Amino acid sequence: MTTTVSANRKGDRRERELVNALDEAGFAVMRAPASGAATERELPDVLAGDGETFYAIEAKSSAGNPIYLTGEEVEALLFFARNFGAKARIAVRFDREDWYFFHPGELYTTDAGSYRVKKETALADGTDFTEFVGRTEKVTLDEVGVDPDEERREILEAVRDGHMPVEDALDVL
């Protein structure tokens, strides 16, 4: 019970942190009421908009372990976002890292129907906070002169040599 209470407090603190960061970036933002408090249907954790784009955000954090969302959480987020006219986003934060954002369709789906985000995936493929709020844009490998075929070869060699699990290589590729 104590672990659950501590995890809930940490989650609440992280949600407030995200709300404050979005507010400082010029978004109108609010935390939704606690799950089930206002309605029978699950609500997203955060609603944010900048006058042009509106987001319904499910926020999750972890010390370093992969973050999992249930299929029901993602379905509820997509349902709310569609009906509200917002873009659905999953925001993840790992300790000592910034927030990273994903559309639910970009997440890895487990055989059990859950969704997973690994720290490595967030850092490599997620939209970082600065880009999310429109202050910068992500640069592609082609734009910086990195050959994607060379990168793929290096990843495959890392798998062959036992330096990277196949599952991680699939996430990166």
Image: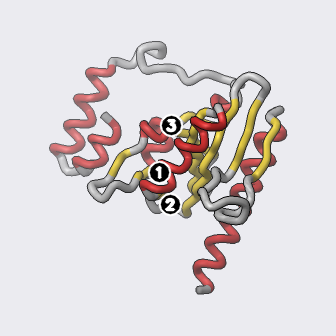
Residue 163 appears in the figure: no
Instruction: Give the percent coordinates (x, y) of residue 54.
Output: 69, 32
Q: CA distance from mark 1 to mark 3?
A: 16 Å
Residue 158 appears in the figure: yes
86 is higher (above) or lower (below) than 77: above
Write down the quadrant of residue 169 in the picture: top left
Upstream in sequence: badge 1 or badge 2:
2
93 is higher (above) or lower (below) than 85: below
Estimate how packed mark 3 is, as few (under 14), some (14 to 19) or many (20 or more) residues with alpha carbons within 10 Å. Answer: some
The residue positioned 50% from the left and 42% from the top of the image is 123
The residue pinned by badge 1 equals 119
Quarter of the figure that contains the C terminus: top left
Quarter of the figure that contains the N terminus: bottom right
Instruction: Give the percent coordinates (x, y) of residue 171.
Output: 33, 41
Q: CA distance from mark 1 to mark 2?
A: 7 Å
102 is higher (above) or lower (below) than 142: below
Q: Secondary structure at mark 2?
A: loop
Q: Which mark is residue 64?
A: 2
Upstream in sequence: badge 3 or badge 2:
2
Closest to the observer: 94 or 164? 94
Residue situated furthest bottom in the rendering: 1
The residue positioned 60% from the left and 50% from the top of the image is 58
Instruction: Give the percent coordinates (x, y) of residue 124.
Output: 46, 37
Left or right: 114 with respect to 97?
left
Q: CA distance from mark 3 to mark 2?
A: 21 Å
Q: Secondary structure at mark 1?
A: helix
Write down the quadrant of residue 27 in the picture: top right
Check if mark 1's residue and mark 2's residue have beta carbons within 8 Å: yes
The residue pinned by badge 3 equals 103
Look at label 3 and name its amino acid: His
